[in-house]
Image: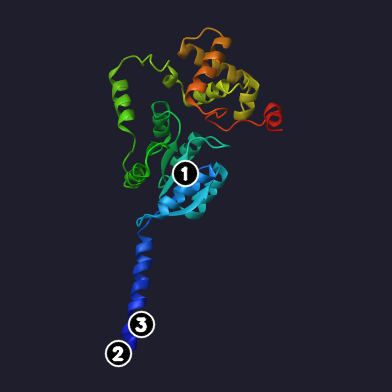
Amino acid sequence: MPGPAGSAAFPLYDLMNAIIQTERKSSVVVVEDHPVLCDGLKQLIDSQPDLLCVGVADDILSAKRLVEECKPDLMVLDLRLKTGDALDFIKTLRAECPEVKVLVLSQYDELIFAERALRAGAFGYIMKENTTDEVLRAVRKVLAGDLYFSERVAAAIVQRTLREKPTASRNGVERLSDREMQVFQLLGAAYSPREIAEQFHLSRKTVETHCEKIKHKLNLQTAAELKRFARKWAAENLGPSEPWVGAPITKRSIEAVG
């Protein structure tokens, strides 16, 4: 009789041990609107003994539901989604769910966007071009409660604190506020002030005020100069027709799809 009882104990022990090991895993949600990359990130996370991907989303509304349902330890968030404003979402998470840490995974220039993401409340910023090992290192560092950003960003932050005036090498773009940056990028994507106002539920006059502030910070004189500069900057720094914020649905955009 001792034999069967003993043999039954081992599977039970193994089962309990497996449950304990699973409970020790850090839960992660992935918010990414590119299906291939999203699936790759999920597989990468699930392949790690200490991590578990508990859900994926491709827009901010779905991401909010994930946070409510799964209460993850970490969110890996793409800065550019088809709908919604990722930076505003990070700010909301920081206020409403401070226990959820955010690691931004983006294709956009870290020298311009990393500090904005960190100021919004993210714990880290990593470029999509990085290796999987570096992505995992960033995930674990953020989960440990540390900030993660590249040496390049760290050097830029230190240099900025040591200078009285911002560098001219980036044409003053880093001086724009988050809202001004959003307006600037949509101008670069050829959106009119009216369309930008619709996107952010603002009056056209408010958008025009933002444009005036942008011109002042970039040392530009006219609206035409601002549009040319914004389009040139967007062509050099963003993907084709990919503003940082979700693009508004307009008659032009519908015709382009058709």
The residue positioned 57% from the left and 44% from the top of the image is 61
Percent across and percent down for residue 123 are 37, 39
Q: How many numbered marks, from 0 up?
A: 3
Disc 1 and disc 2: Cα gap in Å? 55 Å
In terms of image quadrants, where is residue 159? Answer: top left
Q: Nearer the viewer, residue 3 or 176?
A: 3
Depth-wise, is mark 1 or mark 3 nearer the camera?
3
Residue 23 image position (x, y, % from top left) = 38, 61
Q: Quadrant of residue 189?
A: top right
Element at label 1: helix
Q: Give the mark toward the camera: 1 or 2.
A: 2
Q: Residues within 10 Å of mark 3 (few under 14, many from 20)?
A: few
The quadrant in which the C terminus is found is top right
Residue receiving disc 2: 2
Colour convention of the picture: rainbow
Point 53% across, 47% down: residue: 57
For the residue marked with disc 3, what is the amino acid? Ala
Say whether residue 64 is left or right of residue 139: right
Residue annotated with mark 1 = 96
Comes first in the chain, label 3 or label 2? 2
Q: Amino acid at mark 1?
A: Glu
Name the quadrant containing residue 11.
bottom left
Which residue in the protein does label 3 denote? 8
Q: Earlier in the sequence, mark 1 or mark 2?
A: 2
Q: CA distance from mark 1 to mark 3?
A: 47 Å
Q: Which of 141 and 71 lies nearest the eye of the viewer?
A: 141
- Amino acid carrying mark 2 in the image: Pro
- Quarter of the picture containing the N terminus is bottom left
- Secondary structure of the residue carrying tag 3 is helix
